[in-house]
Image (spheres, rainbow, N blue to C red):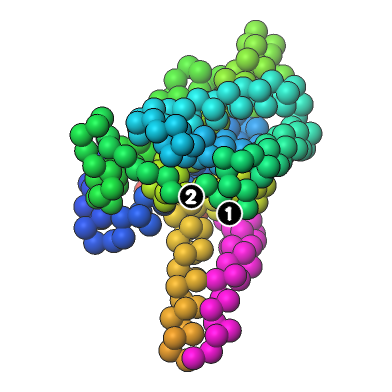
Amino acid sequence: MNKKIAYGLAVLALLIIPFFAYPVFLMKLLCFGLFACAFNLLIGFTGLNSFGHAAFFGGAGYVAGWALRDAGLPTELGLLLGVAFAALIGWLMGLLAIRRQGIYFTMITLALAQMLYFVFLQAKFTGGEDGLQGVPRGKLLGLIDLSSDLHLYYLVLAICIAGFALIVRIIHSPFGTVLKAVKENEARAVSLGYDVDKYKLLAFVLSAALAGLAGATKTLVLGFETLTDVHWTMSGLVVLMTLVGGMGTLVGPVVGAVLIIALENKLGDLGNALANLTQVDWFRGLGDSVTIVTGLIFIICVLLFRRGIVGELAALLRTSVRKS
């Protein structure tokens, strides 16, 4: 019951907050939160450390952007096409990668994702290094004008809540129980008669599809897609979000995504503000130091919060409950 109350209060806060904060930035946070949760389904609950999730996130963004801008498809179909592309790529990559474990699995996903990066770099419709620009928002069901930031915010909120609810349902289903068993002791899961490769492949495809949903939605929000989202550094960023927030927890990746993305944006704003106040242009480059700051955060979490922020808080709460 406590969790239901907490989720209810969180949803209520999310419904109200666009009246007090910039909706586009909030939508960006929601998209990255869903992306981190999708990745956590794979690494946190299945034990598979993919380093190629940028292929699904950015790839779906490119396909959705092409569908909306060039093919002129409705908003719903454009998003679904991006998700379908991510799921297909996830299935193909999973077929090649799941038969390996550990660092070999990680390197295979990285190599395949980088191959896709060079495909998008050379493809004409992506705009190359300039990116795919001018993606229209369209209308929801042909009725609701999504050019309004507020209208689009509530659509993005509904999409992200649905994605998060699906992940929660997966984790607490018999299928999710098998995934946890694979993570804890794969050999034992095999001895119990489970087709481990089939379960891992399905988890990989589900994670890819949800990551694609996040990427396609982000393209709809911002109106463009760039190579940054398909580069390997994006895969590293989602790993960082998940570890900082708390791998294997439900809301930890969301906390990590909010922290990292907010830091990336606000550090640049702080540098511009200092530059305007002091007339020293050096401060404008302060935003470029965000990688150093995120690196320091990662080191601190590894040394002091090995279970992530949410993981450590949950452990402290359990300890206090037992003592009382």
Which one is nearer the viewer's eye here, 241 or 72?
72
Classify 87 as above or below 272: above
- Residue 204 image offset from top left, x and y in percent: 59, 27
- Residue 17 image offset from top left, x and y in percent: 25, 55
Q: Residue 148 has which mark?
A: none
The reply to whether discs 1 and 2 touch (Cβ–Cβ < 8 Å) is yes
Magenta-highlighted residues: 279-306
What is the CA distance from the residue labelled 1 to the residue labelled 2?
8 Å
Q: Which residue is drawn at the image coordinates 52% and 21% (left, top)?
A: 177
Rate crowding at label 2 as few (under 14), some (14 to 19) or many (20 or more) other CA atoms within 10 Å.
some
Q: Which residue is drawn at the image coordinates 57% and 20% (left, top)?
A: 202
Considering the whole magenta stretch, tell me its main secondary structure: helix
> Is 64 inside the magenta-drawn segment?
no
Which one is nearer the viewer's eye here, 146 or 67?
67
Residue type, label 1: Asp
- Residue 314 image offset from top left, x and y in percent: 45, 47
Q: Which residue is drawn at the image coordinates 43% and 49% (left, top)?
A: 134
Q: Residue 133 has which mark?
A: 2
- Residue 258 image offset from top left, x and y in percent: 44, 55
Q: Which residue is mark 1?
A: 130
> Is 287 inside the magenta-drawn segment?
yes
Residue type, label 2: Gln
Residue 294 visible, this orientation? yes
